[in-house]
Amino acid sequence: MAGLASPLALIPPTSKGFLLVMPSMHLSQIRRWLLQSPPAEWTIRQLRELLIGALRQGPVPQHVAFVMDGNRRFARMHGIETLEGHNLGFEALARVLEVCYKSGVKVVTIYAFSIENFKRSKYEVDALMEMAKVKLSQLAQHGDLLDRYGACIRVLGQRELVKKDVLEAVDRAVSMTEHNKDAVLNVCFPYTSHDEITTAIRDTVIEYSNPIRSQRRSFSESHIANTIRSRRLSATNPTARSHSPSVSAISDAEDSVPSISSSSTLHPDSPTDSPLNDDEIAKYRETYPDPETITSEILTDHMYTAGLPPVELLVRTSGVERLSDFLLWQCHENTEIVFLKTLWPELDLWTFLPVLVEWQWKRRKGVERTVGIRSDTDGRSLKKDQ
């Protein structure tokens, strides 16, 4: 005798799927309802404050940077418009900024728009520009978050690539938050690190190509005239330099007291005894910065982030493990780079807080290791002296 069929076998396939999915849908709705209920919200808020307060007791990165990647992928996965994915990404930014500033981070830098993004479709580029204009205006006009933590907006990038109406919104946002002095929000828009470094080198070259007034003591007109004439004489009659101590003294030691002899006295008929023009005298008075004095600190002072601490923590979402030409100069040997598989619109306190805790733990271990090495070294030195 054939066995009895199971109850599910008597249900049409489409109904089976509905029955299997329905409990999970109900559980998701119930979970969402519980989390949004006032008691749950209060509990979560208190727990968040407790965790952030504990985090503030240890070292906190002073400069955190984010590559906000995954907005488009999030939109595709959830079947929504790409622009809506970017809007949800902006909401994630607000959540992350609050965690950073509340934890004690002073500078947050976000990669909002790369120069390479101009290669995307015109529709998406225009939409991103329009959204940037709207969101920057919202940040500035309804900037409770920025005002609460005293954060000002700074926009870093190539201004000439931005449309006029967007640029006006950028300047308005910067102006409306410039009174905040406690923290900084850097918005890289449009930006690449190679472009920033190139601009910094170009500005440094221009600065070092401009003459500066000599900081040495000023000389009289007669001293300058004698020196220039002696150089003319040396150019026309090289033997005169070696035969005349007075000319040698003038040309070789500019700070010395000028000799009463001059090229006109030594060679009355010399063509070098022509009147000096103002350009010659001005050129002698001016000096140029020594290019040998250009250091990495000089270039750092010409970067968009001049005056800000180096990046201590760089986070990129969406599982992509590359820097995409972002803050290459500002990263250094101690910069912690973290790649999260989480898509940017999904980033929240519970995803980002472990990153800060891990950075803090590594920093503490590094300090302990450094102190231990120093103690061992001091101990060996003390034994050696004894």
Image (spheres, helix red, strand yellow):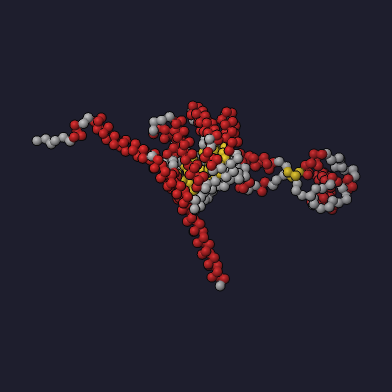
Residue at x 55%, y 67% (from the top left corner): 381
Instruction: Tell me which residue sits at (42%, 33%) in the image.
Output: 75
Q: Position of residue 359 (x, y in %)?
A: 47, 50
Question: Quarter holding the N terminus?
Answer: top left
Image height of 115 relative to 265, above or below: above
Q: Nearer the viewer, residue 112 or 319?
A: 112
What is the number of callouts on the image?
Answer: 0
Residue 290 placed where, x, y %? Answer: 69, 47
Viewport quadrant of the C terminus? bottom right
Percent coordinates x, y for residue 145 in the rendering: 52, 40
Q: Is residue 177 left or right of residue 95?
A: right
- Return the residue found at the far bottom: 386
When asked about the image quadrant of residue 77, the answer is top left
Q: Does residue 185 appear anywhere in the picture?
A: no
Q: Is residue 73 left or right of residue 285?
A: left
Query: Residue 231's spot in the image, x, y percent?
Result: 81, 46
Q: Quadrant of residue 301?
A: top right
User: Which of the two residues, 14 or 325, is positioned nearer the viewer here?
Assistant: 14
In the rendered image, the residue lying farthest to the front is 39
Q: Note whether residue 262 is visible.
A: yes
**Identity of the residue drawn at 43% across and 44% down:** 45
**Residue appearing at x 20%, y 34% in the figure:** 8
Q: Residue furthest top?
A: 123
Q: Is residue 357 above or below residue 168?
A: below
